[in-house]
Image (cartoon, rainbow, N blue to C red):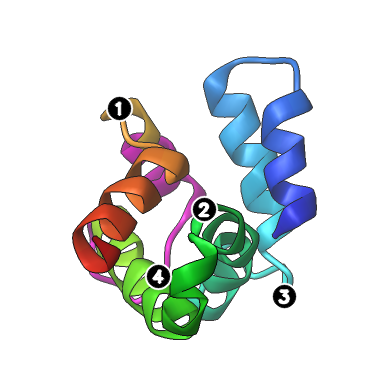
Amino acid sequence: GEWAGGCSVFFKGTTEQCVHSVFDVLDTDGNKKLSKAELKEYLKPFIKAMMPETAMSLQPMLLKRATEKIFKEMDKDEGQSIEAEEMVMWTRRGCNIIDALADIIDKEVY
């Protein structure tokens, strides 16, 4: 998750190329689809970095909820997996991981 997040920051190219590169790193089994578990691994370092220390006990629950919410938003064909193009479309709609997690943390923690 941390490595894929770093790629998205330092990658030079179009947004679509960046999303595809991150997707390829996250797709650990190489089946061209992301499972909830693969998305969860990506979200872990973001959740950890964004959580206030006083709320760290909520981290596992929040990670699960964030994974489910973001997965559902991306999985438009409801195929129980995310394809690269679904992740690209999610990004084109103006969505991004940081804002999505900030919104979830704000609603769930505060």
Residue on which the image places disc 3 = 29
**Mark 4–mark 2 contact, CB under 8 Å?**
no
Tell me the element at label 1: loop
Q: The disc labelled 3 sits on which kind of residue?
A: Asp
Q: Is residue 45 left or right of residue 101?
A: right
Tell me the element at label 2: helix
Which badge, 1 or 2, is on the more N-terminal residue? 2
**Mark 4–mark 1 contact, CB under 8 Å?**
no
Badge nearest the viewer, 3 or 2:
2
Residue on which the image places disc 4 = 67
Q: Is residue 107 above or below residue 13?
A: below
For marks 3 and 2, give the CA distance. 28 Å
Q: Which quadrant is home to the N terminus?
A: bottom right
Badge nearest the viewer, 4 or 2:
2
Q: The disc labelled 4 sits on which kind of residue?
A: Thr
For marks 4 and 1, give the CA distance. 18 Å
Q: Which residues are magenta?
A: 75-90
Q: Nearer the viewer, residue 80 or 62?
A: 62
Residue on which the image places disc 2 = 50
Residue 35 x, y percent position in the rendering: 50, 75
Residue, x 48% and y 77% (percent of image)?
59
Say which quarter of the image contains residue 69.
bottom left
Tell me the element at label 4: helix
Q: Is residue 1 left or right of residue 89?
A: right
Tell me the element at label 3: loop
Say which quarter of the image contains residue 43.
bottom right
Which badge, 3 or 2, is on the more N-terminal residue? 3
Residue on which the image places disc 1 = 94
